[in-house]
Image: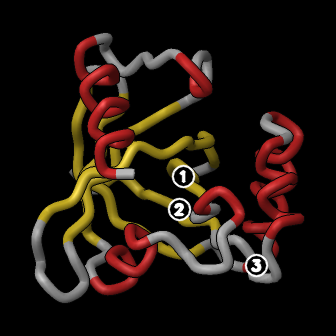
Amino acid sequence: MTDWNAAVIDEFRANGGKVGGQFEGAPILLLHTYGAKTGEERVHPVMYQETDGGLAVFASKAGADTNPAWFHNLLAHPDAKIEIGPESYSVHARVADPEQRNRIWSEQKRRFPGFAEYEQMTSRTIPVVILERTG
C-alpha cells in the first residue's frame, strides 16, 4: 500500500491535484496526519466531498473490517494539514455527528457507488470525518 500511495501522491503533486487511474475525475486531497504514537507526519491520498463548513473524508479502507490508520491518527491529533489542488492549509478534524454523517455518506454513495460496496463488505459503520479549515 505504501508504494501505491506514494505513486498517487507523486502524480497528485506533479499534476496540480489531478490523478488518473481509478481516481480519474474524483475529488482527491492529500491528508497529512501525525502518528497517534510516534507523532511522525504521514500523508494519505483520500477522496473528499465539499460540505457546509468544510470537507468530508471517509474512513472506508476499501471495506476492511478496521478503520484506516489515518482515522486513529486524527482522533489522537485532530489538527492536521491538507493539500487540495495546488493549495495547502491547516485543518481541524472532527467525526461527523450521526445526522450529518448519514446525509454526507448517502450523497457519497450516490456520487461514487464504490462506497456503497465498501459498506456492504464490512460490519462497521464507516466514519465520516469533517475537516474544518483553520489556517
Q: Nearer the viewer, mark 2 or mark 1?
A: 2
Q: Residue furthest top?
A: 15
Residue 79 in which image quadrant: bottom left
Residue 103 in which image quadrant: bottom right
11 on left or right of 98? left
- Dot 3 falls on a residue whose secondary structure is loop
Could you say which disc has been placed on residue 62 in the image? none
Q: How crowded is mark 1: few (under 14 residues within 10 Å), some or many (20 or more)?
A: few
Measured Cα–Cα span from mark 3 to mark 1: 23 Å
Check disc 1 and give the amino acid type: Gly
Measured Cα–Cα span from mark 2 to mark 1: 9 Å
Q: Nearer the viewer, residue 4 or 10?
A: 4
106 on left or right of 54? right
Question: Where does residue 51 sit, x and y in percent of width and height?
Answer: 63, 47
Q: Nearer the viewer, mark 3 or mark 2?
A: 3
Q: Nearer the viewer, residue 132 or 15?
A: 15
